[in-house]
Image (tube, coloured by chain):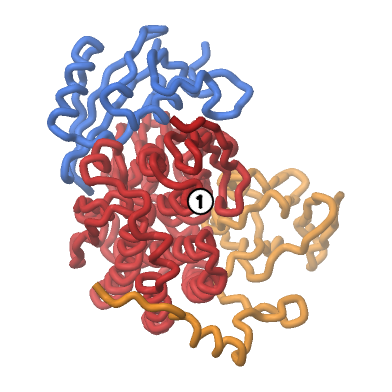
Chain colours: A blue, B orange, C red
Amino acid sequence: MEEKNDIREINARQFFPAIVKMRTEKWRLVQICATSVEGGCEMSYSFCRGYDMRTYRFVAYGDEEVASITQIYPCAFLQENEAKELFGVNITHIKPDYKDKLYRIEEETPFKEKE
Amino acid sequence: MDKIRAFTLAGRMLKNLFRRPATTQYPFEPADYPERMRGHVRIEIGDCISCGLCMRSCPSGAIVVDRKAGTWTIDRFDCVQCGSCVTACPKKCLFMEKGYTEPDGVKKSETFVKPQEEPAGKTKKTG
Amino acid sequence: MAKRSIVPFGPQHPVLPEPIHLDLVLEDETVVGAVPSIGYVHRGLETLVKKKDFKQYVYIAERICGICSCGHGLGYCMAVENVMGIDVPERAQYLRVIWVEMSRIHSHLLWLGLLADALGFESLFMESWRVREKILDMFDETTGGRIIHSVNQVGGVQKDMDSSMLKHLLETIKDIERDIKPLVDTFLKDYTVQSRLKGTGILKKDDAILLGAVGPMLRASGVEYDVRMLGYGAYKNLSMEPVTCTDGDSYGRCVVRIKELFQSFDLIREAIGKIPEGDIHVPVKGNPSGEYFLRIEQPRGEAIYYVKGNGTKFLDRFRLRTPTTSNIPPLVETLKGCQLADVPVLILTIDPCISCTER
C-alpha cells in the first residue's frame, strides 16, 4: 500500500490559474487523463515536483470548451490531442493540433460514451 | 575523465574468429526448453468436468467448452499461452507444457471429447 | 537565410524498431524543427478493460509492449491492489523486484545494442545482444516465457523461485557482469562512439523538467528523480540512489543507462540476500471500487497507471501514460539544431517504444 493520491477538484474557471501557478512553481506535467463520466468527460491533470504528485480535476460537460495548456506546458500536445481524438473533449487551440489525425483510426471518438 | 581509446573491441573480435558460435543450429539441433516453459496447453480430458471456468478466464477466447456434448475445444492459433486457464481450472486437469505449437498453413482448432464409457479419450481434428 | 526544406523521417527507417514519423524542417543540413506524428499502431487496449474481467486484464496489460511487459503487468496489478487495499506478501514483493530489475537489465542491454546499431557499430550490437540472451534464458527458466512473463497477478505473483533458481540467477548475473565490462569500456571510452555521442542533443536541466522528460532522459540532465525512491514494493528495504549525469547529451544518457545496469545487478543481489520465506500471493475477494494513480519506474522512465473501478468485475477506466509519451516533446527539443546525420541516434537515445505509447 502506498500514500494516498492528492486529487483536487476544481471548476473550469479555476483551472487556468491553477495550471499557471503550477508552472511558476516549477512543477513537471506528468499526465493528462480523460475519463468518460455521465454527461461529459472528467479531465485529470497530474503534476510532479520532487516526489510529490498533485492532480487537478474538473469535468467538462458536453461540448464545453476546454482551453489547451500547450501555451504553458508545450509538452501537453500529445496527450491533449489524444483526449480530443479518443474522448471527444473539445480542447481548443492545441499547438500543434493534429485535427483527429494523431491516431490513424477510422472511427471518430471511439472512447466516448455513446447513448 | 578517462583517456579516449581506439580499437577497444578489436581483441574480442579476433577471439570471436576462433570461438564457437553463440547460436545453435536450430532446426538441425533440438532446442532445449526449460521446465517452466509456457508452450502449449494440454488437457487430461478424463478429469474434465466441463465447468467452463477455463473458457471464461481465457483473455483471447480461444477455448470453447460444450457441457452437453462433453467436448473441450481449443483454437491453438488464438491461444496466447498466458496460463490463465491452468490457474482457473478447479480439477487441475489443464497443464502448461513445453514445446511450441506446430506451425500450419490454415487456422484450425483441436477438439477433445470426454470419454463416456470407453477408457481412452479420442481426439479428432476439425478444420 | 538558407532555404528551408522538409524531410520526412520514418515510419519505416532502419534505426526504428517501431513506427514513428517525423517531419524534419531543415536549413541545409541542420534541423531547425520537427513535428512528430504517431498513430500507426493504435490498438485501443485501454477500452478492452471494459470487456475483460479485471483479473484477466493483467494478461492484456502485459501485452501492451514486449520490452516493458513485466513492468506493465506489475503496474496494473499494483494499481488495482491499491484500489482494493490488498497487502501483497513480502516474498511476492521481493520476487517482483527481482523480475522487474531483470527486465531493466534486458531492456538496457537491448538499448545499448540498438545504439551501437544506430552508430553503425555492428559487432558491438551483436556483442550486447549476446549478453542479453543470458538474461532472457533466465526469464525463460524462472517465468516460462522469454518476453511475456505472465507472473504478476492481482494479489501477488504466480510463480515462486526456489533456492536453486536464485543461485543460478546469481551466477548468471555474475557472468553478465563479467561479459559486459569490456563492452562498457567500448561504449564509454571508444573514440568512434564518443565522437558520435558527445555534445549531441543536449537537453538542459530546466528544459527537461518543463518538457516533462522522464527516466534516463531526465536523469541524464542532472535531475535526481527515480520513482523507485518512493519505496513501492520491496524497494523500501533495498538501498539505492538515483543515477544521474550532468552532461545532458546523448553520451550522458548512455552513461546513465550503463550505470543503471550495474545498479540493477546490485539490487538483484541485495534482494536475493534479503528475500524472506512465505506466501507468494493472497486470495482476492470482491471487486475494485475507487480510483488510483500509480507511478512506477520502468526501464524507460516513469510510467503512470490509472485505474478506476465501479464495484463490478469490469473496470471503468484504465489509463497508462508511458515514458515515451513524455519523452517525445523533449526529443523534439533536442532535435533542434542538430545535424541530419545525428537524427537517428537522437531518436534512439530516448529509447522510443511506440507500441507502448499508443497502446
> Is C147 situated above or below C208?
below
Left or right? Give the position of C284 relative to C147.
left
Residue C9 at what x, y percent from top left? Answer: 57, 41
Chain letter of the residue beneath label 1 in the structure image: C
Residue B46: tell me if it is visible.
no
Secondary structure beneath label 1 = helix
Q: Quadrant of the N terminus of chain C?
A: top left
Q: Please tell me which residue lies in front, C29 or B3.
A: C29
> Is B112 situated above or below C338?
below
Furthest residue in direction left, as rendered: A25
Residue B19 at what x, y percent from top left? Answer: 59, 90
Question: Which residue corresponds to mark 1?
Answer: C341
Residue C314 at what x, y percent from top left? Answer: 46, 33
Quarter-wise, where is residue B5 in the image?
bottom left
Residue A111 at what x, y percent from top left? Answer: 50, 23
Amino acid type of disc 1? Ala
> Is C36 situated above or below C174?
above
Q: How many marks overall?
A: 1
Q: Please tell me which residue lies in front, C227 or C354.
A: C354
- Residue at x 50% of width, y 39% of height: C28
Quarter-wise, where is residue B13 in the image?
bottom right
- Residue at x 77% of width, y 56% of height: B112
**Badge 1 local density, few (<14 within 10 Å), some, or many (20+)?**
few
Furthest residue in direction front, as rendered: C1
- Residue at x 79% of width, y 57% of height: B116
> Is C166 situated above or below B104?
below
Residue C248: tell me if it is visible.
yes
Left or right? Give the position of B89 relative to C191.
right
- Residue at x 32% of width, y 73% of height: C265
Q: Please tell me which residue lies in front, B36 or C98.
A: C98
